[in-house]
Image (tube, rainbow, N blue to C red):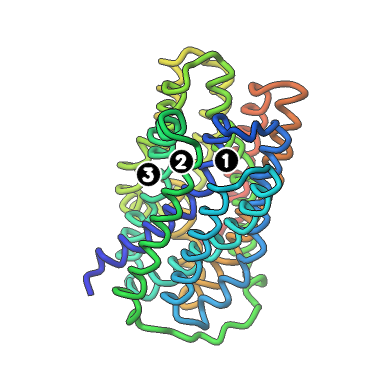
């Protein structure tokens, strides 16, 4: 089997797991259910709660069960949950569907990283493969900002979830057709990975980074709208938060290979923290476009660096290590909406960006002082 096909299918799965969690941050603006800021935050938090509670089980199961089967079931679940969200007629149903959407999406990252660690044994080749795989992350943000406002305005906010449902079903079938014969490695993993210092540092520093990152991702579009910027322009600005991430993600593997995982995490997280604080300074759309573009480039050097770090540390237990680290990374998504809405309601968006930038810089310092790779 061509390795490019493996990257395409796993990356597309990762795309859908991320696109599904981004959708509400945009379509809620146009939803006929008229959610409040607090209801928005609860929907985000429930998605992440569902996502987080399966991370460690997903990692352990990924090392013991055929990856293609796990991915197939996960995508079927995502398809069903997205369809329920599309037809819901109350905020309560959105709460339920968001929770189960998170549970379904939560299995995808560990199992796809496990699949790549099996298919790409050489570390240098693996770093480049994960770089291409990680294109899914910026691409999901770019497409969310470009197409979701248009779909919501021209058709209905519900069609965004119909789209996710159909695509999830389609890619679930590709696992049965093309990836069912991926070599299977049963590592009989035992839960001892928490003893590894590097895993603990990657998990905790990652938690702090993502605590701030989710604030940006979930509230940037509403911030642009709040500044008086039009819906379509706000959508494009939102997309710029990831557009430069497309070339960045492609070259990320080569950068990581050249300067190392640790330096990549320290340097680019520090820069990203500074840029985040600048969101509170530059308020014109053209200046925000420049900041957002730079953020997109820097952010998506960090993404594959995170994935490469857990892959290197995990080795043949990459599924379990990824699940453990991702448990902490994504658990930040439970708390981030709560903290963000508190800051927004009491002091405003500008203070949110300053707070987020400081937390990201602190995360980079933790990597610099404690990470040994």
Please state which of residues 125 and 228 is positioned toward the viewer in this rendering.
228
> In the rendering, at what x and y percent does residue 191 appear?
65, 78
Residue 366 sits above or below residue 189 on the image: above
Q: Which mark is residue 139?
A: 3
Quarter of the figure that contains the N terminus = bottom left
Residue 74 sits above or below residue 12 on the image: below
Task: Indicate left or right for 2 with 150 as reference.
Answer: left
Residue 288 sits above or below residue 39 on the image: above
Q: Residue at x 45, y 31 (%)?
A: 149
Q: How many labels were placed on the picture?
A: 3
Name the residue beneath numbered marker 1: 213
> In the rendering, at what x and y percent does residue 331 appear?
66, 54
Q: Residue at x 57, y 30 (%)?
A: 29
Q: Residue at x 50, y 67 (%)?
A: 74
| Mark sitting earlier along the chain (1/2) | 1
Please state which of residues 349 and 247 is positioned toward the viewer in this rendering.
349
Res 283 visible: yes
Mark 1–mark 2 contact, CB under 8 Å? yes
> In the rendering, at what x and y percent does residue 221 appear?
53, 28
Please state which of residues 366 and 154 is positioned toward the viewer in this rendering.
154
| Mark sitting earlier along the chain (1/3) | 3
Dot 2 alpha-carbon crowd within 10 angstroms: few under 14, some 14 to 19, many 20 or more: many
> In the rendering, at what x and y percent does residue 337 appear?
68, 40
Res 297 visible: no
| Separation of marks 1 and 2 at Cα, in angstroms | 9 Å
| Separation of marks 1 and 3 at Cα, in angstroms | 16 Å
Name the residue beneath numbered marker 2: 299
């Amino acid at each position: 089997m061509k390795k490019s096909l493996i990257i395409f299918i796993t990356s597309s799965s990762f795309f859908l797991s991320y696109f599904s969690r981004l959708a509400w941050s945009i379509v809620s603006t146009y939803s006929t259910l008229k959610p409040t800021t607090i209801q928005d935050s609860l929907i985000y938090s429930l998605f992440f709660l569902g996502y987080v509670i399966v991370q460690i089980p997903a990692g352990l199961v990924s090392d013991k069960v055929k990856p293609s089967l796990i991915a197939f079931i996960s995508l079927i679940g995502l398809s069903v949950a997205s369809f329920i969200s599309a037809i819901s007629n109350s905020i309560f149903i959105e709460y339920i569907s968001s929770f189960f959407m998170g549970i379904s999406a939560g299995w995808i990252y560990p199992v796809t990283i496990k699949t790549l660690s099996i298919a790409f044994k050489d570390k240098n080749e693996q770093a480049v493969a994960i770089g291409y795989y990680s294109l899914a992350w910026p691409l999901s943000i770019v497409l969310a900002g470009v197409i979701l406002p248009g779909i919501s305005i021209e058709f209905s906010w519900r069609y965004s979830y119909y789209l996710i449902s159909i695509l999830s079903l389609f890619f679930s079938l590709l696992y049965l057709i093309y990836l069912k014969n991926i070599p299977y490695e049963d590592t009989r993993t035992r839960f001892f990975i928490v003893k590894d210092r590097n895993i603990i540092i990657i998990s905790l520093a990652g938690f702090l980074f993502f605590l701030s990152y989710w604030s940006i991702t979930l509230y940037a579009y509403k911030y642009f709208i709040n500044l008086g910027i039009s819906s379509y322009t706000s959508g494009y600005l939102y997309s710029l938060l990831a557009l430069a991430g497309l070339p960045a993600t492609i070259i990320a593997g080569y950068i990581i290979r050249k300067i190392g995982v640790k330096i990549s995490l320290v340097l680019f997280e520090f820069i990203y923290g500074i840029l985040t604080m600048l969101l509170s300074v530059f308020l014109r759309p053209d200046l925000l476009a420049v900041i957002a573009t730079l953020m997109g480039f820097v952010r998506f050097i960090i993404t594959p660096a995170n994935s490469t770090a857990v892959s290197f540390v995990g080795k043949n237990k990459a599924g379990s290590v990824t699940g453990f680290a991702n448990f902490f990374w994504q658990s930040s998504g439970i708390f981030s909406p709560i903290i963000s809405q508190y800051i927004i309601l009491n002091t405003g968006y500008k203070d949110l960006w300053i707070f987020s930038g400081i937390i990201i810089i602190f995360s980079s310092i933790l990597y610099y002082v404690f990470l040994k790779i």
